[in-house]
Amino acid sequence: MSEKKNWKNDLILVGVLLAVSVLAFVIINMFVKKPGDKVIVKVDGKVVHELSLSQDTEVIVEGYQGGYNEIIIEYGYAKVNSADCPDELCVHSGTIDKSGETIVCLPHRVVVEVISGNNEIDAEVR
Amino acid sequence: MSKKTKAIAICGVMTAVAMIFSYIESLFPIPIPVYGVKLGIANIAIITVLFVVGKKEAFIVNIIRIALTAMLFGNLNSFLFSIAGGFLSLVVMIGLQYTKRFSTVGISVAGGVFHNIGQTIAAVFIMETGAIIYYLPVLLISGIVTGIVIGIVSGLVVKRVKSSFFNMEN
């Protein structure tokens, strides 16, 4: 078994995977994500809040097995301001404002998702 | 020591190593606000078993590692995510190993990428939100980068374990 041949195959594999990933990234960010105007908050798959991005507000949702996430909407962006989940990745996820963008809290099974409200079919498909 | 005894010993040691690596990694999460971005150092042990002992053994060691890690340090939630990622990545790594065309780097990159694909699929079903798919490209790129690092380290480990595995006095 020649080492050189192995490296060539590895390189092709890595190259193909990288090309697919970058292409998917570009397509999603340029063509799929559109400006959103509504935010839906789901806990364990069920929609518990539907909020407008243009109206500053603040809601606290309970995780599917207790715990809380504090969701804030201000300046047209949504973010998770505070939470008591162990990793707090949702808090560090930053702000979202384009349709399809999400903030996820896996431990609490909370999803904050931006949708574009004037395109109902789009929202239904998701 | 017979070859079979050595194989069993290596599987046992690598299961333990993989569990410790999983635990260490859960203690120091990488501060990137995207779920699923991690080094996957436990995969070093799995790849070592895959290259030194065999495909079936690598599969069993990985399943045992995931089950034991979830029981000791995790919960049902974390178990579902790791079994989805671990199962898919192992199937792909074993498939690639059959072709005998790839080194530890290629296998590890494919494993990392498909681990993240498996976890994303699990997340879509558990969270019931298709929009999580949009994270996938970022996860794929992170899987490639960490896969290269883990693959290089695994190559060094495999070389050393292999030489002691075959040169040990009977």
Image: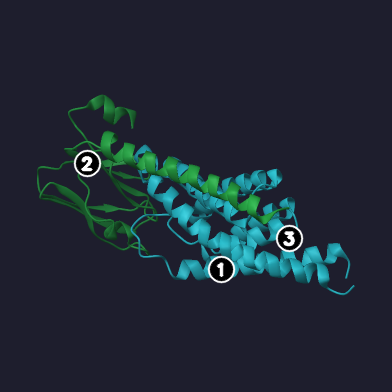
* Chain ID of residue with mark 1: B
Q: CA distance from mark 2 to mark 1?
A: 37 Å
* Chain ID of residue with mark 2: A
Say which colour chain A has.
Answer: green
Q: Position of residue A117 (x, y in %)?
A: 19, 32
| Three-letter code for the amino acid on which mark 3 is drawn | Val
Q: How is the image coloured?
A: by chain
Front residue of A78 and B157:
B157
Neighbourhood count class around disc 3 (C-alpha, 10 Å): few under 14, some 14–19, many 20 upward? many
| Three-letter code for the amino acid on which mark 1 is drawn | Phe
Circle on res. B12 = none
Q: Position of residue A85 (x, y in %)?
A: 35, 61
Q: CA distance from mark 2 to mark 3?
A: 48 Å
Left or right position of A105 against B39: left
* Chain ID of residue with mark 3: B
The chain drawn in cyan is: B
Left or right position of A57 against B41: left
Neighbourhood count class around disc 2 (C-alpha, 10 Å): few under 14, some 14–19, many 20 upward? many
Tell me what residue is drawn at x 39 percent, y 56 percent.
A107
Q: CA distance from mark 1 to mark 3?
A: 19 Å
Determine which quarter of the picture holds residue A113: top left
Are the residues flagged by discs 1 and 3 from a single subunit? yes
> SS of the residue at dot 1?
helix
Tell me what residue is drawn at x 42 percent, y 43 percent.
A21
Front residue of A113 and B157:
B157
Contact? badges 2 and 1 (CB < 8 Å): no
Circle on res. B21 = 1
In this view, the mark in front (2 or 3): 3
Q: Position of residue B133 (x, y in %)?
A: 39, 41
Q: Which residue is mark 2?
A: A98
| Three-letter code for the amino acid on which mark 2 is drawn | Lys
Q: Which residue is mark 3?
A: B52
